[in-house]
Image: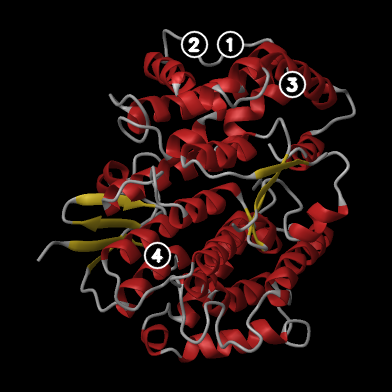
Amino acid sequence: MEEVRVIGFWASPYVYRVIWALNLKGVKYEYQEEDIFNKSDLLLQYNPVHKKVPVFVHGGKVIAESSIILEYIEDTWPQNPLLPTEPHARAMARFWTKFRDDKKPNIYGFFQRAGEEQIKAAKEAQECLKILEEHGPEEKKFFDGDKIGMTDLSLGWLAFWFEGMEEAAGIQVLEATSFPRLHTWIRNFKEVQVIKENHPNQARLLVYFKWLREMYTKPATT
Amino acid sequence: MEEVKVIGFWASPYVYRVTWALKLKGVEYEYQEEDVFNKSDLLLQYNPVHKKVPVFVHGGKLIAESIVILEYIDETWPQNPLLPTDPHARAMARFWTKFGDDKKPEFLGFLGRTGEEQMEAVKSAQECLKILEEHGLEEKKFFDGDKIGMTDLSLGWIAFYFEAMEEAAGVQVLEATSFPRLHAWIRNFKEVQVVKENHPDQARLLAYFKWLREMYVKPATIWAEFGAAYKLLCF
């Protein structure tokens, strides 16, 4: 059987997208941890363009960029599909995945800032989250329907990372009363077996975010 | 037959990706021009999330974001495929398409800057172009092999827009001696029938970029404003 390997970093939501996808499809893989603060020659060789994780290796072939890896996994192992069959529904799944990735600076800004700037950034994050909330699952349980799919995996960072970031940054952004659909979705997402068994340790994540925040908000840090 | 419509703007390379794809596949469509400086209620209704062109309408269903539209077009009309069949080759096509889009600020920064900042922006653009030259294109005729595909359509803006931007900005970035493969690709890309018959008017594009540049380098303009204008212009 061909080698399947994921090169990742324990705190990366982009890496978890890939891990979740492989687990959902029952694909066995080897996981290799990378210290992104001290990048290995292997990573620089495997992903010379971006020098980031995740990197996916299958039978000697290398792919970078999590959303592209998900499409590859979907093309290669069609069981338990991540995308619907209908072309317009597929387009919508891709649209929301892209939305989340393109809006990352807007949504994360509050974590990196302090004072007045942080309040502004939090409002900006809430505008983006409001868009997700409005298009979020109403009758459906997940963004991708009754079962999780590519959109849900791409938004998985809301379920495990966001709370840690809010706590470390000392600000509430994703309030339950303002975002009821997203909160319901988070609860449902966390109940999915594969997700339940594969997610970063919350306490460890909080320590990591507190340390990151300190770095971002040091006076000399730009 | 179901309605196929493209809502676009004459100067947008994102719109051209979509119209090239449809023409390559022989799909008839209606084109509707949008004034991106004075957005219509229709656009705001069709694309409330991003308020940008292109918007694609097929049988009453709407799709925004040019790459998402290209994937939809390829799935709906499989003739003359834009993506290869091999999963890894598909991944590579998507990777370079994404690279071109993610690096837009680096590619285009020189248009809105002057002096030292512009020189730095030129270097930044050249680093990205070097990556395309050496890792993306390599020895192939097109990014997608012997025939054009999704990657070529996505990077097609380099063939038609870059020269006009360089002229408007008064700098040379994509020099033939430093980027022989990209220059060869530009020549080959422009020879493809569908591309030859469908591209923005170069003189009009030059006038447009000169005007854009004037806007960007006015003393009151700061980078944040440039960013806002950049987004407004969907480029």
For marks 2 and 3 on the same chain, the one whose residue lies earlier in the sequence: 2
Mark 4 to mark 1 CA distance (whole Å): 39 Å
Residue that numbered label 1 is attached to: B172
Could you tell me the amino acid type at mark 4? Val
Question: On the rendered image, what quadrant is the C terminus of chain A found in?
Answer: top right
Residues marked 3 and 4, same chain: no
Residue B175 marker? 2
The mark nearer the N terminus, 3 or 1, is 1
* Same chain for the residues under marks 4 and 2 in the image: no
The quarter of the picture where the N terminus of chain A appears is bottom left
To which quarter of the image does residue A51 belong?
Answer: top left
Q: Are marks 2 and 1 on the same chain?
A: yes
| Chain containing mark 1 | B
* Residue of label 4: A15
Q: Along the line of sight, which residue is nearer the eye, A177 or B24?
A: B24
Regarding mark 1 in the picture, which secondary structure is present there? loop
Residue at 44% from the left image edge and 59% from the top image edge? A67
Q: Which residue is mark 3?
A: B209
Chain letter of the residue beneath label 3 in the structure image: B
Q: Amino acid under label 1?
A: Gln
**B192 w.r.t. A193: above or below:** above
